[in-house]
């Protein structure tokens, strides 16, 4: 299998952590894609040129981090990551974590791809409100980390890690319970440190 991703990609990181948890990481060749390099982008088999994308040995292409993670879980038989009886609840929580990440990404892109005069401050405020609202919801609805985290917990940890990476951990002062939760996740899930984007920057 080939995973097309990049070290800074939060959604790529979610797939990598899931691959570690399922024991499948050693079966995956990671192909690093640099979105700012047109030549690198030609390596990506995803016609939308989005990452992550997983190419199976058969040539089948699987896109979107949610779909890739679920594929890895099913292939490994590690159903404790996404128990069937909790499927809708955990996927909904995972979607909320993804939504926070997407809003944070939009804030990064707004500053990266626009000149200072083009930046829409109201747009940044709206995206930041989504981030803060999502973090407050998770603060009020935290779940305990057990030996194997569930897929929504992986997603939340990646989201918080992305906020550390791109926003210097500003969220930690306001959301202390989440900061403590992330510390516990880091200690219990070796794949989190192994996929740290700052270690590969």
Image (cartoon, rainbow, N blue to C red):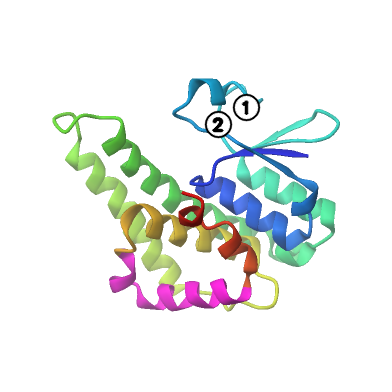
The answer to whether residue 26 is left or right of residue 200 is right
Query: What element does badge 2 sit on?
Result: loop
Where residue 33 appears, as percent x and y from the top left, is 56, 33
Q: Are marks 2 and 1 in contact (CB under 8 Å)?
A: yes
Under tag 1, what secondary structure?
loop
115 over 73 or under it: above or below: above
The x and y percentages for residue 23 are: 78, 59
Q: Is residue 13 left or right of residue 104?
A: right
| Image coords of residue 192 (percent x, y) | 58, 63
Q: Quick one: 190 or 117, which is closer to the camera?
A: 190
Q: Residue at x 56, y 64 (%)?
A: 193
N-terminal label among 2 and 1: 1
> Main structural element of the magenta stretch: helix, strand or loop?
helix
Depicted 10 relative to depicted 6: above or below = below
**Residue count near mark 1 (Cα–Cα under 10 Å), binned few <14, some 14–19, many ≥20:** many
Is residue 17 within the magenta segment? Answer: no
Closer mark to the observer between disc 2 and disc 1: 1
Numbered circle sitting on residue 44: 1
Image coordinates of residue 60 in percent, x first then y, are 79, 30
Q: Is residue 172 magenta?
A: yes
Q: Is residue 55 visible?
A: yes
Q: What segment carries the magenta color?
A: 171-188
Which mark, by number, is residue 106?
none
Is residue 89 in view from this perspective? no
* Cα–Cα gap, marks 2 and 1: 8 Å
Residue at 24%, 40% (x, y): give it.
Answer: 123
Q: In this figure, which residue is indicated by the disc labeled 2?
A: 50
């Amino acid at each position: 299998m080939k995973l097309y991703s990049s070290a800074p990609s939060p959604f790529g990181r979610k797939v990598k952590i899931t691959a570690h948890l399922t024991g499948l990481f050693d079966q995956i060749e990671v192909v690093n894609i640099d979105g700012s390099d047109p030549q690198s982008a030609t390596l990506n088999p995803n016609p939308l040129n989005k990452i992550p994308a997983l190419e199976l040995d058969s040539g089948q292409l699987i896109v979107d981090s949610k779909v890739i993670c679920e594929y890895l879980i099913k292939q490994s038989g590690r159903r404790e990551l996404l128990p069937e009886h909790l499927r809708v609840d955990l996927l909904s929580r995972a979607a909320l974590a993804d939504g926070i990440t997407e809003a944070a990404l939009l804030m990064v892109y707004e500053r990266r791809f626009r000149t200072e005069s083009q930046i829409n401050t109201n747009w940044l405020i709206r995206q930041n409100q989504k981030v803060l609202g999502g973090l407050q919801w998770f603060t009020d609805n935290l779940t305990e980390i057990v030996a194997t985290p569930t897929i929504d917990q992986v997603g939340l940890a990646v989201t918080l890690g992305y906020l550390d990476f791109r926003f210097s951990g500003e969220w930690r002062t306001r959301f202390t319970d989440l900061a403590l939760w992330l510390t516990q996740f880091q200690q219990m899930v070796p794949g989190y440190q192994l996929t740290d984007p700052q270690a590969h920057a």
